[in-house]
Image: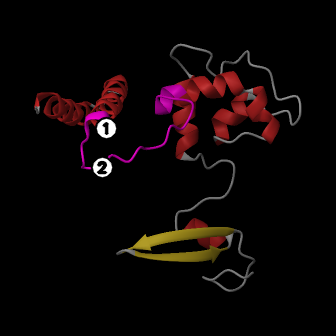
Amino acid sequence: MKCEHCGERAAEITLTEIESDEMRTLHLCSTCAALKGVGSGPADSPPIADLIAHLGSGGSGPAFGPDAEACEYCGTRVKDFRKTGRLGCPQCYVHFAGQLRALLRRVHGASQHMGKVYMSSAVDIDDTEARLDTLRRRLARAVEIEDFESAALLRDQIHQLTETP
């Protein structure tokens, strides 16, 4: 596929732009992508790599320390992961499982996706206890990740449910 900007070189990068609620996908060569401020080389550090490097540099728990061994399958080392924000192969997820779990807990507050629970506006006696339980767990989670605005809203919802006769 040819570059959609210059039409001369082969397209290497797919760029999706959103302007005034309109999505547009462009297939660009590396030269035209660089003109638009998009890089493709390993020297370009994605934001997730910066976050991981920052989180792995300090804190508690089994982070990606310098003493961690390389993946036995592909040879990816911790410094490679910190630099690119990417693991080398599917075996890396198994090899670095403990460190990844700790990193996910620090970034997202949990290492497993829990999903969302739909809460209808109709409140039954049995449903009230389930809603209170869900709201209390969400409140604890909001406090844990220091999302105090959400915590205040959840606290008010809990107060409303417990105050109504």
Q: Which residues are magenta?
A: 105-126
Residue 2 appears in the picture as rendered: yes
Residue 30 appears in the picture as rendered: no
Task: State the scheme by which the image is colored.
Answer: secondary structure
Q: Give the numbered dot on residue 127.
A: 1
Q: Which residue is mark 2?
A: 120
Foreground residue among 116 and 87? 116
Give the main secondary structure of the magenta stretch.
loop
| Kind of residue at disc 1 | Asp
Foreground residue among 154 and 86? 154
Foreground residue among 20 and 136? 136
| Quarter residue 96 falls in | top right
Q: Sequence-wise, which precedes: disc 1 or disc 2?
A: 2
Residue at the (61%, 59%) spot, across then down: 39
Pointers 1 and 2 in contact (CB under 8 A)?
yes
Residue at the (61%, 26%) spot, across then down: 101
Q: Where does the C terminus fall, quadrant-wise? A: top left
